[in-house]
Every structure is written in structure tokens, then in C-alpha cells.
Amino acid sequence: MPVIARLPHVLYGADYNPEQWPESMWLEDARLMREAGVNLVSLGIFSWAWLEPRPGDYRFAWLDRVMDILHAHGVLVNLATATASPPPWLSARWPESLPLTKEGVRLGPGSRQHFCPSSPVYRTAAAALTRRLAERYRAHPALVLWHIGNEYGDHLTACYCEISAAAFRGWLARRYGTLDRLNEAWGTAFWSQRYSAWAEIEPPRAAPGPLNPTQQLDFHRFSSDTLLECFELERAILKEVTPDLPVTTNYTYSNKALDYWRWAASEDVVSYDSYGDPARAETGPEMARSYDLMRSLGNGRPWILMEQTPSLVNWRPYNVLKRPGQMRLWSYQAMAHGADGVMFFQWRASRAGAEKYHGAMVGHGDLARSRVWRECAALGQELTRLDGILDSTIAAQVAILLDYESWWALETDAKPSEGVRLLDQVRRYYAPLHTRNLAVDFARPDGDLSKYRLVLAPNLYLLRPGVAENLERFVTAGGTLVMSFFSGIVDQDEQILLGGYPAPLRRLLGLSVEEFDPFVPGQANSLISLDGTFACDLWADLIDLEGAEALATFGGDFYAGRPAVTRHRFGGGYAYYLGTRPQPVYMARLLECVCDEAGVTPVLDAPIGVEAVRRSGRDGSFLFLLNHNPEPASVTLPGSGTDLLTAGRLAGTIRLEPYGVMVVREDEGADHPHG
Amino acid sequence: MPVIARLPHVLYGADYNPEQWPESMWLEDARLMREAGVNLVSLGIFSWAWLEPRPGDYRFAWLDRVMDILHAHGVLVNLATATASPPPWLSARWPESLPLTKEGVRLGPGSRQHFCPSSPVYRTAAAALTRRLAERYRAHPALVLWHIGNEYGDHLTACYCEISAAAFRGWLARRYGTLDRLNEAWGTAFWSQRYSAWAEIEPPRAAPGPLNPTQQLDFHRFSSDTLLECFELERAILKEVTPDLPVTTNYTYSNKALDYWRWAASEDVVSYDSYGDPARAETGPEMARSYDLMRSLGNGRPWILMEQTPSLVNWRPYNVLKRPGQMRLWSYQAMAHGADGVMFFQWRASRAGAEKYHGAMVGHGDLARSRVWRECAALGQELTRLDGILDSTIAAQVAILLDYESWWALETDAKPSEGVRLLDQVRRYYAPLHTRNLAVDFARPDGDLSKYRLVLAPNLYLLRPGVAENLERFVTAGGTLVMSFFSGIVDQDEQILLGGYPAPLRRLLGLSVEEFDPFVPGQANSLISLDGTFACDLWADLIDLEGAEALATFGGDFYAGRPAVTRHRFGGGYAYYLGTRPQPVYMARLLECVCDEAGVTPVLDAPIGVEAVRRSGRDGSFLFLLNHNPEPASVTLPGSGTDLLTAGRLAGTIRLEPYGVMVVREDEGADHPHG
Amino acid sequence: MPVIARLPHVLYGADYNPEQWPESMWLEDARLMREAGVNLVSLGIFSWAWLEPRPGDYRFAWLDRVMDILHAHGVLVNLATATASPPPWLSARWPESLPLTKEGVRLGPGSRQHFCPSSPVYRTAAAALTRRLAERYRAHPALVLWHIGNEYGDHLTACYCEISAAAFRGWLARRYGTLDRLNEAWGTAFWSQRYSAWAEIEPPRAAPGPLNPTQQLDFHRFSSDTLLECFELERAILKEVTPDLPVTTNYTYSNKALDYWRWAASEDVVSYDSYGDPARAETGPEMARSYDLMRSLGNGRPWILMEQTPSLVNWRPYNVLKRPGQMRLWSYQAMAHGADGVMFFQWRASRAGAEKYHGAMVGHGDLARSRVWRECAALGQELTRLDGILDSTIAAQVAILLDYESWWALETDAKPSEGVRLLDQVRRYYAPLHTRNLAVDFARPDGDLSKYRLVLAPNLYLLRPGVAENLERFVTAGGTLVMSFFSGIVDQDEQILLGGYPAPLRRLLGLSVEEFDPFVPGQANSLISLDGTFACDLWADLIDLEGAEALATFGGDFYAGRPAVTRHRFGGGYAYYLGTRPQPVYMARLLECVCDEAGVTPVLDAPIGVEAVRRSGRDGSFLFLLNHNPEPASVTLPGSGTDLLTAGRLAGTIRLEPYGVMVVREDEGADHPHG
């Protein structure tokens, strides 16, 4: 089923903010949208102050007109609940609705997200507006999707005010039941932190020394849950009034604040704002990674690329322009990784405000001359040829485990090394797989892993209950696990899992770790393996083998000769362990061997910079070929097929233009067993 | 007319703070002042707590004695209103008079400028003291100049307290009249910021995300105006009591907080505190630039170098000493650029307090041995030979446009590139002109430009009403304009001037800019011109010619071959445009060609590091030759003349000592048509 | 007499936090302690919330049991007053007991040291707990030492709240008596800061510009004194209840916040927490330096190494592991420099909290496999052979002057160069002496210096009354003084000592300094001496000789040829002066010559990285040989002796293992006249 049942096409469009423009321009906007192939716009995301200029004084007439115009032009609407930026009157009347930093600074209005997520005033007003909108437009023919809030947790990840403190205490009481259990979980015997009353508990505000890490971890959990409550509050209203309409909220780039696994469970469709920096060479693979995460959050379902810029953004220090063809390439990259819709921020570039230099489909200048407009309109037309891929999926044999609670715990202070950062480790696993065009999912460590042949666990520092058993089950059943140092160290309360690191995984990994040796930047050691000697840095585990075999040993220091990389036969599978951070070439070789051993094979052998992804569905199998290079590239197809974009027949070795794309509908019978 | 009618000499002196020393030393101070040629001191700048030790308890007896002693020794007085640092009792009794940062930190006493500029308490107390001082000393024979406040906006540029918020609302109401107009100007349709009541408006305090840029711009305007109100309040009292005495306040180095054009309109004489860092090679040209600005602020009138150090300062991390001769050289540099007075901070080095390591004419040690004292006293004597230059002026054919509102807007956040900084761009225009000894003024974009042949507009980002027309008028009449990228982009509300960048200047420049391509640091492109290939960086405009011709094209990237530097014949003149930031050698060559074309010629061809400036007046023409090099230099004079410092006759090729200075009174009939 | 009269052995043990573990483990802990040779533990340091879970509700039963178990196993107790981290109920009930930063941020609970040192609430509760503990355990047979607080001034050095402000005013009133004297001392004539009432005075909170330096200096003094009052409050109670038990509190690494000279006067035994970073090559010498300071604070008495890690810490960004043998080496280094006890933080690694990754004697893993445990247990056994050295002392002929008030004043803002940092200068004197195995004490500038031959004064910026006379006395009597630039500049009020720098020392040094020439980083000059030419940087004094002779002159700049390093015969001794910062090789040569001249000779000539220290006592003379190199080293002994660790006889050239240690009981009659 398509993402939007009523719109069986690749979604194409943008954020549309008509309130910034005179009504006289709305018809022209709608006409241009048709010209550009736009079939969906996100409407009203920052319209609260326009919809409710004074408390309780709702003004929907203008929105009625916009909806009608759009509908008349065949443009459907992703209607926002408009609650991401409260109007000035809210904080002016109720200053306590403004958020507080950990240093006690009250953050004011004038930008956006200036609300305490626990504020009853904010929630009541947001709910009232949501209900009014739902009731007014429940039957509007243009309405096909609800857009709740906007980029939750982007600017404001947590609030430390008294209202939030009380909510935190309530959340803790629900989590722990009794104060004794909280004292136990937080380890308050340390540094004399034992609580004798709930009222004594505070958010982790600025303090003279390092804060209790479990308190910090629970505050992460609470803050993610509290923003989720805001989302759920609006969702419940929408589902009550319009039970058949899907809802979404747009996720953001590398957002660590929200446990998206928990959030995604409440969404009908995952949507994502993708803002990779064109200035960085790693951006292509990083976007692929974030797209794979979005697909995985939705359990493999198609998702929507809700925002990207057609040209440049304005919030980096230096905002590099996407080169001609790059916007198209990256749009197809999102689709290759499972998106069924490609949208922009925004339709028409603002004249005023903090984002007026953000790119848009319609810029400030003469449309007739605009390269950006030409590329956008051309893409809109081209995408109509891809309806066949709707609802097709990607069959990955490899999963990378991602656990937000573990991520939060890992990067809290007072660790052996602040150099151990989850995304860096994920990148080091993901990059060589991506280079080889291996499809990768993300998965929860306690989820069903049975469909994967290979599971990668970079720094799975915190083990929630059941995770160790789940991993054992996976390997026992023949799966292959690759895990990095500083995994399996603490439980869900961030307390050490006693019994020799990593205690619950020793049996599975066939080893224990006696000591950690964190490195200072610039410090290195070497790995000696049958393949040669490789550099490693950041960290060394002093490993005792307990059944595993050493694949590589350390070349230097007082533990020279001790195992650095190991493999353990466990049940029907293998558990690998990396006791250090090897240089990329070693990671690539190791993962290649592991994949071969596990029977994981790439979609395609392709030159550097050429990405190949296969989506499969009822209508067949679609091979996306994406040339990220500014030069042409040659690729040999595994079989024959038809390029959906040109309708040309393809077989053998084909040529991809610089930033070129092909979407090959593969002929039946072609040999493509995996990916 | 001399700056100070009663003092027809080059002013020479220092800040004098006798309250820091026992009365027994005052006579000796006055005696030493005579020895050093001091004819003017700035008195009482930080004396409020001494003059009014308790609210309303005024003590003038000590100041009477100081004034009398000075007068008896022939030293005149620039008397301060003493309001730059309120006494502790003010903030102790009225804590609300203290300023608040944007994060809500109340800044305390213990340093200086610890007052909210909108505070009625501060203003009332400052006005009362000013009136008392004015009435007491109105007829004192030593009093020749009033010194209001001190370095306004140096430490404290803005206050965010509730009193300031109310004042800001009042200022906005006066500017906009109606809330609708404010909503329109601020573009509050963006991000749901529409105000429904004046009381909802706040200063741009700390917020979760980027703030409304027009709100920020108006707060800049308000803050400059509010400090100006403090100045005007005191000025009005002084003018009421002593209508014939001139007033001044001292401006500071590269101060961006105050719109000095607006301020200077209220001053009888511009004065300036010059603190260039001797550690930096660029300091000489930068000081020249700031001196040219000071002269221009006063509409060409002579100004006073109110403060400089004779040796070193104490507020940099590393405070490098001026080399022997350097203080003298830089003093003459100020005079070359139009100063008629040279003064120091301070007369006698403090024993205590935050500035005791700041250099002074009289240091902590033995005067008989002091190099600094010797140099100061020698300069004082020497300056008596320069009375002839008083009131002479500099005839510049070139002006650089400087608009504070545009500067504020340009450097507010959320722009395409934070690397675009006005002073950097000004420097890149000023430096090659200065190197060639071309006299330069600064001018307001909406001022009268008819006296210039060449007008330079580095990043004139914001166009106030009438500016585009003024520039067209200038070029039409035969003038030459050189303008840089990212000019003419927004109106006074910081809203995009629609119609293709830079819309109001397209006709004049003969081009439009389709896209911006900001560079990351380290990124570069090249300029291909008839003269060769040059590097450029920071930014590229994608230019469409509309009548202009390309002088250089880009050498690389997808817009290779498109225009980078252009020239447009417009009316009787030319409009040049730079769509990038060229390397300095290109700027130098381009500006040389432009100057030749425009008939702008240098004062003198001189070796690198030798500065030549000509002042002209009723008494003739004076050529300042300043050798900034620590080695000797040879210069060929355009004619013959007399060195005022040595009375020696000069002609042909002469030798300047290291850090040497000559002030040549040029013989009549000599050939010096320009500058 | 041993440090602990009842424990005539080298103290060995750790912080013990049994409240973090089930009671069932306590017996096992005690058994393991015996196995490891532990004879003393620090108990209860963070137990307040466990001892008094609710206000006034004291629970001592658990501590009774711990004390009894320890006693039964022969482990004595250093019992803490448990006041370093107040329980959450304290700040929940009395939020005003929390500290405030200079920006007004209220620091919350959740870490430790979250109390305002002036808070009556905190002090009352801390005193009550201290009294209860003292009365309960006064006669407990395990109790041998009191541990007051913990690492005072480590996280929290000062509080800026209203309670602290009132206390500051009281402290000032006691110091100055009258407001006139305070105004005089603070130099409030500067910047209009004259106070007309005590209530106007504030702590040096955030302000618009640089704060009054004397205000800042007095606030340093006040803050150190205020924390000392907390210590004294508890000490008085303990001395009242248990007059015969010694008290201590643990000092911290390079702590600048506390004037340890004043603190040490109130302690029975100095104890120290040593956390040198194994990642830095300079750590060995730096630890030696801090150990020499600890010994000197206790007037030469043995001290206790109260905390160190057996392996790694967790509060640096990157926490490098001590290599095998390094913990043992550094433990002996502490003893070589006068420690009679070696203890760890902590006994058993925590499961939870902010320090769970801090190393411990008993780690998280399997004890049987633990290298760290093996090394700890071996050291515990080995130390029993060193009882003979107890109470022996080190006879240094060299002292480095250290004055905390001068340190505070030197590093306050608004100085000629922020590059002048006391510890850097101390290091540059200490390092070459340490390399040559010269014993060094630290001394107060106004203390008795008669026992030293050589006194070093790096940047003795502030001269308290009597210091100049004391130094003159020392040199007159034949001593040698070496002093650096920017010494003797200000008096105790941080006011310039007028009369030509350094006025009170001109007679002694035979020179005066006309000007300072601070350098920017990267700037250098050269020293020309009979020995050759050397680099110097940071600073140059322009020196006039007044009796001294120049040992080196500057090679460059306008003062080339003027003196840079001088020597002055004064009475029976010499006063050297360094007017710049020479490169290390020059410092080494100069100090070698000075030592030779002054008759100061090293303990031993040894290879680089081999440290030799001699302790002498009733039981003879003990030569510590410490090889800091990871390679073996050869040393030639000055005589013969017995290695206490192996009981082997030694003479001639012996070999030290990598990180190896020997403690040689030297045979009588051996030739070791010094050190």
C-alpha cells in the first residue's frame, strides 16, 4: 500500500507557508506547483500565530482558501498541527511555559521551540488548536496526512524548570515505584546522594562536579518521553477525529535526543529531514546511513523524505551549494533506500526571518533563469515514471544494532575515554559495507534478529534486560555477530555488570576483558594478523581468551601478543570481537571476510563512489545506480533491464553520467539473489 | 578655526586622575606638565564617587583646587561629566540600575559601565551631576572642552532587563506607529512570531534557536540610540549652561555597537581613543583607516586623538611595547590624517586598579631615567612647531561607504556565510589604496558623494531608502563605483529586495545574480582576466550580465567562464562589481586601473611602509612623510619645501630615519594637484 | 614519631566505601585487605546521607559493624567527618545552602561539594554530624586518624551568594577595620569605586569590564579562609572530644584555591591526593615537585599519600593506564620525598556513580586474574620492609619560594602578559634541579630561610610586609638568591611598590627595571653570555645596573646589549636576577653554576630519568633510586649499602630494572655529605 493511500504516486512537494505572502500570489503558487509536478505540500507548520492570533480567537478563513486553491489544482495537503512555535501571547501571558536551561537561563521567544514540554499551558493550548484543526478539516478533500509539531528535539532537547522537575519526579515514581528502588538504581550510596523524599530529586542541573550518571540517563529517557507525550497528545486527538488519516512528524539529522524506536512505534509513516553537508566527502554515505535508519524505524516500510534543500541551507557557518545534479542524485538516493516521497523545505524562499537564505524550489529571483527551479521541475516530472517502485522494500542481510539508551549512557561524562563516540563507531562499520553496496538495516538489540545473517554491535555499552540472551539466540541459530570493545559493560541503570567485562557476553564471545587501556589522541598500537600489520588507536582491551581464538594480536606495549581481534564459535554461528579501533582498511578486510563466511553478498560490484541499491516489490525488482562522482563511471549490470527514467534497455556495461542516476527495472530471471 | 578656539595650538596632554594621588603631588604634576609641553588635560572622567560620595552629597573643593593649579600652570581642561562609572551607592540602592545580559545575568559593580542605559535612576543621577559640574565650572578659566561619559559602548553595548525591554517597546512604537507595521517589518509570519500586543515584544534574549533578524537589527538600532540618549541628555544640560563650550565624547577602536554617523551629528568635535596593537604588522594601515573614519565622521573637520598609550596597554593577553620612536610616528600619523590634538591615557600611571600596567607619560619609576618620559616631553616640545597646520584639511577623491545598519545586518546570524565580515572587506579595499598613498574618506551611502571621483562599496548588504538612487546619481554624473558581492540584498527591515539580486542595483551594475556559492575555509576558485589568473575565495556570485562587461571570469567549478568581475558604463561613469573575494594582488591591480581611469592619483610614490598624506589649509600645503619601517627609507619629493620639525629645507630625494617623520610645508607652485 | 603513633609501619590502604556494597561482602573485604597488607582505610568520606538519612535521624549501626570488622582484622581506620557531600535533604530544605557562581547560577545537588562554605545551615549540620561521630567513636580501638571533609576547594573554590557576600563584608571589616582603609587598600579612587558603606561591597561577580584586582585578591583570601573555617569548625570539635587523635584533610593536585601554608598550620599531618597524568612525560618531575611541597607544608614532617589510583582515573578526557610497575615506582617516589604512607582511591571499584571507572585495588573483574590486584598486594607486602625509614627526613639545601597570595595576584587579569604563570616558572626552576637530583624544599618568603644555601624566587610578584627584609637577611648571611622578572612589583594590596621596579629589592639585586617588554607567543630574543648564545622568550626587563654585574645581555631589539641576567654581591651572598625567560638549557647551566658557587651538591649523578633522593633519620640514611624509564638503567652508588626491598648488598655500579626501585640503607661512613 502506498504511504498515502489516496496518492498512489511518488510524493513530491515542499513546505508551503502562504501566510508569508499576499493572497494574490496563492493562485500563481498553485499553478507553479502543477508545473513542477508537486502533488503534496506541508502546510501550516508555523501558522499558530496566524490561526490563533489571540488566545481562543481562531482564524481559519485564510487556511480554508489555501486548502481550496490547492485542492483545485490537484495538490494534496500534509496539514500541520502548527504547534512547533507558540505565538508570542503564550509566553507573554504564561512565562512559566518557557523552557529553562540547566544553568537556569529562561529561554525566550523570538525563535521557535520555546516551550517547556511539560508545560500544562502549552499542552492545553496545543491540544485545543489540534482539535480545532482536526474538526475543521476532517473532511477536506485535500487533506491526506497530518504533520504533528516539527523537528521535535532539534533546538530544545530538555527543560530544567520546576514544572519539568515535578514531571521528572512523576516519571521516576512511575519507573521505580519506590524511593528505595530509585536509590538502588541510581547508586546513591556514592557521594552521599541518597534521597529520603521524592521532592528532593532534581533534574541534572549545573553542579559543582560530575553528576550522577544514572540521574543523567533517566533524564535523557524522561526528556525523550516528555516530548513524545506532546506528540502523543496531539496524535490521540487526530486519531479520535480522523481515525483513517495517517500521522507523521519529521525526524532530524543524527538526532540523539529522542529514542526514535519508541517514537516510530506511534507513527503511521516515518518522515525525515535530510540536511547532509555538501562540503564533506562523507556526506553521501552518511545520508545513506540515516536513510537506512529511517527505513528501519518504520520496520522496513517506505518513508518520506520530508525536507531537504534544493540548493543550500543557511544555518551552517559556511553553507555550500549543492552542485547541479546533486539534488537529483540525493533525492534518488533517498528513494533507493526506501523513500516513497521526496519533498523540500521550502516551496518559496521567505523574504524575511531567520531562514530567508535557505534554498527553496522558488527562489528570490527570476524563475525563468533559475537553475534550481529547472532542476526541481524536471525532477517532479521525472518522478512520475517511478510509481512502480512504490511500496517495494529492501532485503538486508546485515543489521547494525542501535540502542538510544546505550548511546546516551556511553556518551555521558566520567568514562574511560571521551573519544569513544557511537556515531564514529557506527560509521566505521557502515562505511565499508556501504562501499561494497551491501544493504544494511538498523535494529534494536532486543528485537527479532532472525532475518539477518550478520549483526554488528559497535559499542553496545549498555545492555537492557534480555539483550544478552537475544544475541546468544541469534548466534546459536547460525548468525554472525561482530561486536566492539566497551560493550556489555553496564545494565539499564548504568551500573557495572559484575563478573568480569563484559560479564553477560563472556560466554557468547568466549573471552573476558581484564583491563581497559584508553589512548590519548595521537597514540597508537598495531594489530598483527595473518594478513599483515595494521594500525589501531583509541582503546585497547586486555583480553583473556575463554574459548575464542585470536585473529589479531597487539603488536606493542606491555600486552603485545595478547588478543586484539577474536572469533568464537558459538552454537551454529560465530561471535567476533574487536578489542580496539582498527584502521579503516583492516575493518574493510575483516568485514569482507566475515560477510563471505556468513554468506552475505553485495548488490553489485561497482567503482568507488557508485552506489547500488535494490528495492523489490510486487512489481518486480528495481536496481538503483547512483554515481556520486563528479566524473562519469562504468558499471556492469548483473543482468538486463529497463531504465525507468529513460525507458532505455540496459545490459552489460553501462555508463553513468557525473552525478548520474539509473533506476533499472530488472528483467525476471536475472541473477540477483541478495540485497 | 582651531578645535578649541581658546587654544590655537596642537593640543597635547593626557587623562589626569589626581584623585588617585595625594594633594601634595598636584603641584609637581602641573610643573611636569609644563615641562612636557602639555596644554590640555582630560579631568574627572572617573570621579563620580569622589565628587558625590553619597547621594546628593557633592564635594567639589578638591576639583576646584586641581582646576586652579592647572590654570595657574597654563594647562587647560577638558572636563568630564564623570558619568561613565557610577559609584557603588547607586547600584547598592537601586540594583535595577545594573545591566542584564541576554542570558539574564545581572552584571555587578566593581569595574565600570555597570549601568542600564535606559535606567531612570542612572539618568537622573548622571544629569544631576552634569548640571552641578556645569554650573560650578561654567566660568572657570581653565575649562575649554566638555568630555561626556567615556568610551560609550565599549564594555556594555546593550542591556536586556525589563526596563530596557519597556524602552525598546517605546522605541519600536515610535518607529513603527502600529503593531501591524511592526509585524510586517519583522516578517512575523515566519515561525509564528506575530505579535498581538506591544507588551509581548521582548529584547532578543537567549532563545532555543536563531532569533528574528529584524528584531536583532532593531535592537542594535535601539541600543545605539539609547546610549546616544544618555549622551544627549548630558549634552543638552551642558549646552544650556555653557552654550559656547564645545562638547565631545571619545570613540573607540573598531566599535560596531554605535552608529557613529548619528552620534557625530551631536558632537562639536570628534575625539578618538586609538589602541592599535604594535604586535601586528597591519596596525599602521588599520590606524590610518580609523583616523580617516574619525575625520569623516566630523565631516572633514579636525579631530582629537584623545587617548593612546605612550608605551603599552594592559588589557590584551600579551601587551607589546611600542618601540622607541613608534609613539611619535603614530602621533604624527594621526595628525597626518586630520587630528589637531594628540593626547594620552594617562598622565601618571596608577598605583592600583585594573589599569595600573597601562602605560602613562609619567610611569611608576624614576622620571630622570625614563625613555617614555623623554619621548613624551620631546614630542610635546616638537608639536609647538606645527601650529600652522591647525584646521587644515584633506581632500580625498575616494570614499568608502560605511553604513552601520548594514554592518549590523550583515553580521547577524543565519547568513549564507559567516565568513563575510565587513571590516575584512573594508580592509581589502583600503589596504591597496593606503599602500599607494591615496587619500580616502568614509561616507554614508545616502550622503553627498559628488565631491568624490571614486566610491567603494564593500558588502553594502542593506540598502536604506534612497541609497540606490544616490549611487545611480553619483555614477550618472561621471563617478566610478566599485561594489562587492552580497550588496543591495535587503531593505531597512532586513527583508529581501525581490526582483533578482541585487534588485535595486541591477540597472546600475548591469547584471543580476542568480545564485550565491559560499565557500568553506580553504576552498578557492580562480579569476581569469586579461592580466592573468588570480586566486579568489570566500564566495562566488553566479552572475548574468545585463549590460555590464566581464573583466574576469571564474576559472573553475560548474560556473567556469561566467563573469566574476564586471564593469558597466552607466551615464557618465562606471559601475564595477566583484562577485567574489579576489586575492590582494588582484585587488591592488584592479583598484590601480580604476583609479587611473577615474583620474584619482596618489599623493606620492613611496617605498613600502612609507606613508604620505597631504593636509591643506589657509597656511599652505603640508606633506606628512611617515616611515613605518624600522629601517631608513628614501623618498623623492614632488617639489621643494621646509620640514616643520627641523626647519630644514628639502627637495629631491630625501632620507627618512627608521620610524622617522617629516612634515613638509610645501613651497607654493609645487606640483601637487591631488590628495 | 610515626605519623600515626599507634601504627609504627608504613601506612598502606585505601578509601573504603562499604555502604556501596551489601553487608555480606564486608568480611571478605577485610580478609582481602589483610592479604594485600592493608593496615589503614579511610572510611565514611561520602557517608553523610547514610549516617543521617533524614535531618537529625542518625544511623551508626552499620558503621559500628564496619569498624568492628576492620578492627577484628587488624585494619585501622582514618575516619571521615563525612561532610564533603551534604545529603539531598539539606539543599532541598534549605536551597540557600547551595553555592552560586559569579554569573549567578545556583549550583545544584547531584555531584558533591554543593554547599556554600559560608552557609550557617551547612555548617550547623556538618558540626552536628562531626560531634556525633567523634562522640560515638572516640574510644573505638580501630580509630587512629580523623579525615575532615574531602579535597576542599577541588570542585568548589568560591561562592558568590548573598550569604557569602555578607561573610565577605565581615571578613573585610575584620581585615581593614574602617571603610577608609579598605578604600585606600583597594584603590577605589580608580574608576569611581569608592565605597560609602560596607553594604555596598559585593563579591567580584560578573561585571561589564575588568574587576578591581584588590577586590579579587581579597576574595581569593576570603574564599580560602572561609573553607578553612569549615575545616577549623570540625577540627575544634574533634580536638575537644578526642584531643589525642591526629586530624588531616587531603590536599589536591596543583590546587591554587587554598593557601595551603595557612591550612597546614592547623593540621597534625599533611595528606595529599596525587593524580599525575601517565600520558605526560613531565608527570614524574611534577609529582616530585608536589611531594616536596607537601613535605614542606608539614615543615619537613612525614606526610601521607592519601589517594592515588592503582591503574587509571576516569575524569580526564582520555585516561591513560599506569604501565605495570609504574604504580609501585610512583608510590616509592612519594616515600622518597617524605611520605610515610601510601594509599589509594579506592579499595573496591564502585558499581555505580560518577567514579565507577576510576581504578581501585579490587576491580570489577576476577581478582585471581587481576594484574592490578597482584601489584597492589605485592606492594603491600613489600612495604613492610620499610618501617625503618619512618620519620626520617630530607635535608634540602635549596628552597623555592611559594606565596599563594602572590600567585593569586600574579594570575589575576589586567597584567602586562597573561603568559606569566607561576607554575610554569616554578617548573622551569625545579626541573633542572630535579634532573640533577638536588633536594628541594618549598618555603614561605617570610619564613626562616637560614637553613638553605640557595633560595629561588620565580615571579615573586607580590611582597608581603617583611619579605624584602627577610630576603636581604638571607643573602647578607651568605645565602644565594635567584629571582625572576616581575617580582617585587606590588604590595599586599596589589598596589605598585613605587620607587622604580622592584623598589624594595633594588638594593638587594643591585639593579632597577625601567620598562617591561612582554612578548607575544612565538616572539623571542637571545641571551649573549660567556657560554654562548641562548634563546629567551615571554618577557624582557629593561634593566639599569645599580651595582650588579651582567652575566648575560640581550642579543636583539632596541635594548640589545642591556643586561638580561645579573649577579649582585650583597653582604656575604649573591643575588641573581633573570630579566627574561631563558630556554631550559640556559636555566640548567646557570643553576648548575649557582649551585656550585653556593656549595649545593646533588645526591647522586644518575642517568636521565633516574631519580635519587636521600632520607635520613635515627635509623640511618636511605637512598631511594627510582628508574622512571621503561628501559633498564645503571647507577654508580656513592658507597655501599643494603637494598631494603631485596635485602641484597649493593656497591659500585648497579642495575635498575625498567620502572625499577631500590631503597638502599647506606652503610655508616659512606660519603654522602648533602641532600
Image: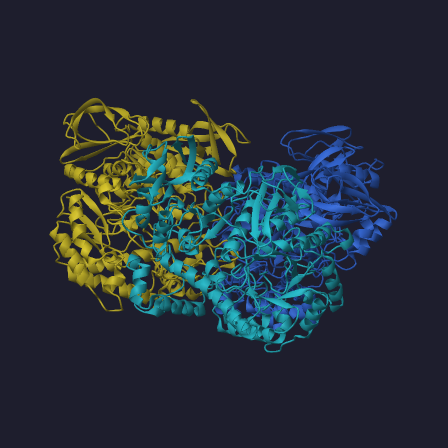
Chain colours: A blue, B yellow, C cyan
Q: Is residue B309 left or right of residue A238?
A: left
Which residue is more in the foreground, B416 or C298? Answer: C298
* Residue B319, position as x, y percentages in the image: 36, 43
Q: Count the labels in the image.
A: 0
* Residue B611, position as x, y percentages in the image: 28, 31
Q: Is residue B271 left or right of residue A420?
A: left
Quadrant hosting residue C205: bottom left
**Quick check: can you spot residue B459?**
no
Q: Is residue B102 left or right of residue C614?
A: left
Residue that sits furthest to the front in the current view: C669
* Residue C400, position as x, y percentages in the image: 45, 49
Which residue is more in the foreground, A520 or C362? Answer: C362
Relative vertical location of residue C103 with respect to residue B659 in this rendering, above or below: below
* Residue B156, position as x, y percentages in the image: 37, 55
Relative vertical location of residue C175 with respect to residue B302 in this rendering, above or below: below
The quadrant of the image that shows the C terminus of chain A is: top right
Relative vertical location of residue A78 with respect to residue A53 in this rendering, above or below: above
